[in-house]
Amino acid sequence: MKSKISKYFLIVATFVMANLPAFAAENQGACDLIKSLKPVIQTLRTLAFIGAAFVLMDWAWGFIKSGKVEMKDIEAKGIGMFVGFFLLFGVGLILQFVGSNAGQEYFGCVTGALK
């Protein structure tokens, strides 16, 4: 089930990243959408990075609290936590890129350096 969801997420993310620059160059609506959603994108980016930190912190605190680490603990809990961390961190990086000037230039939006 998890691999199916991540596969769909990867397909959608690839489609959006591949097709949005052409769409943005033809239609200014995507640029206006990114500009109007910039506060939302920044909030979601911050929450994704905070969520990634909490996932990693929970993983580490469980091992610190128990005082011992066995291989079965790492296999049972560690792999899921690592996947969760990297998914949240990846979403944060994508949102960071979309909200930045480089991301807007990638999508074909005209940005001014000195405003």
Image (cartoon, helix red, strand yellow):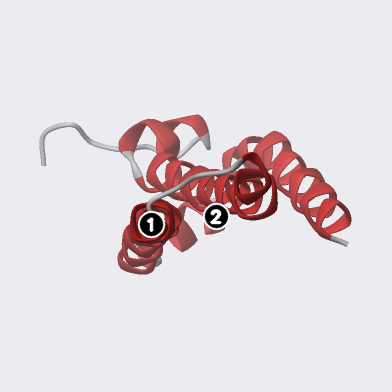
As helix, strand or loop, the secondary structure at mark 1 comes to helix
Expressed as whole percent of the image width and height from the top left, the position of residue 100 reads 33, 41
- Classify residue 83 as left or right of residue 68: right
Residue situated in front as seen by the camera: 58 or 51: 58
- Classify residue 5 as left or right of residue 66: right
Q: Which mark is residue 65?
A: none
Q: Nearer the viewer, mark 2 or mark 1?
A: 1
The CA distance from mark 2 to mark 1 is 19 Å
Identify the residue at horizontal 88%, vertical 55% (top origin).
Answer: 4
Asked if residue 91 is positioned above or below residue 65 in the image, the reply reads above
Q: Give the residue furthest to the left.
A: 115
Asked if residue 21 is positioned above or below residue 42 in the image, the reply reads above
Looking at the rendered image, the quarter that the C terminus falls into is top left
How packed mark 2 is, by other alpha carbons closer than 10 Å (few <14, some 14-19, many 20 or more), is some
Identify the residue at horizontal 77%, vertical 43% (top origin).
Answer: 15
Expressed as whole percent of the image width and height from the top left, the position of residue 65 reads 35, 61
Identify the residue at horizontal 32%, vertical 37% (top origin).
Answer: 101
How packed mark 1 is, by other alpha carbons closer than 10 Å (few <14, some 14-19, many 20 or more), is many
Residue situated in front as seen by the camera: 11 or 57: 57
- Classify residue 24 as left or right of residue 104: right
Q: Amino acid at mark 2?
A: Ala
Q: Which mark is residue 30?
A: 2
Query: What residue does disc 1 label?
Result: 45
Q: Which circle's residue, 2 or 1, is located before the other in the chain? A: 2
Expressed as whole percent of the image width and height from the top left, the position of residue 43 reads 32, 66
As helix, strand or loop, the secondary structure at mark 2 comes to helix
Query: In which image quadrant can residue 82 be found?
Result: top right
